[in-house]
Amino acid sequence: MRYNEFEELFSARRMRKYLAACNNDTRRAMTLYRYNLKLSQELFTIISCFEVVLRNRIDKQMVAHLGNDWLRDAILPSGSLYYDRRVENTRKIIEKAYNGLMREGNYSHSKLLSEMEFGVWKYMFSNAAYALMGQRLLRIFPNKPRSSRQHRYDNTYIFQELDYINKLRNRIAHHEPICFARPNAVTDTSYVLNQYARMMKLFNWMGVDGPSLVYGLDHVAFVSGKVMCI
């Protein structure tokens, strides 16, 4: 495809950064755009695996603590878990999903879990939600380092780590480039490699062999190298 056709489809504004990173070489700019898509695809695969594992570990912990329908029960008027203004936004997300499933006659606990976005799991480690849920969720990280005076590995730390991953997930979902040193038009994949390393660390803290889990799916380092060679 010729560059003018490519630019017409994706917009001059979107392509401006790719052109600047490639010294206005239009063919290289198109190649970089395509590799950014490939890198996004690779990272989203890892994020998807991480999100499902995180969700299931949270669910297992909360089922043992609150029962088989803990997520639904948390937002029912008869309950009190999420009837707190500090977690109102999360309650609204859960309520919307629950009400939709009920209208369809399709409710099950597993279906409600799958309707939740990554941010719901992240916010379960916020101070308010963590306290409301019994201060139990750090138990899903049995290999987490012990806190010290210098380093606190508490729920706030986990929340921040998940926030980094959530932001990358959202950038990919909104088709934003992830191959640049933000905010500059300089090709740099250190940002995504740092988030990849963060997920592998948290896998390890959960007692999960991350590399084995994503074996055959993980081409992040390879595609990252291709990006940096353009």
Image (cartoon, rainbow, N blue to C red):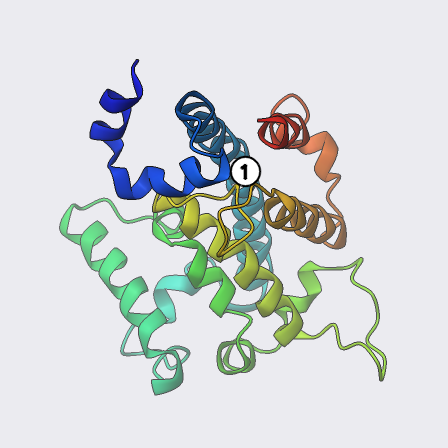
Q: Please tell me whether residue 8 is drawn above or below residue 142 in the rendered image.
A: above
Kindly indicate the quadrant of the structure image that contains residue 217.
Answer: top right
Visible residue check, residue 75: no
Kindly indicate the quadrant of the structure image that contains residue 215.
Answer: top right
Where is residue 8? Give x, y as percent: 20, 29
Q: Name the residue that disc number 1 marks.
A: 43
Task: State left or right for residue 189 relative to residue 6.
Answer: right
Q: Secondary structure at mark 1?
A: helix
Residue positioned 26% across, 33% down in the render: 10
Where is residue 5? Give x, y as percent: 23, 21
Near-viewer residue (154 or 7): 7
| The C terminus: image quadrant | top right
Q: Please tell me whether residue 24 is drawn above or below residue 143 in the rendered image.
A: above
Residue positioned 14% across, 52% down in the render: 103
Residue positioned 43% across, 26% down in the render: 34
Near-viewer residue (178 or 125): 178
Kindly identify the amino acid type of the residue bearing the numbered disc 1: Leu
Visible residue check, residue 130: yes
| Number of callouts | 1
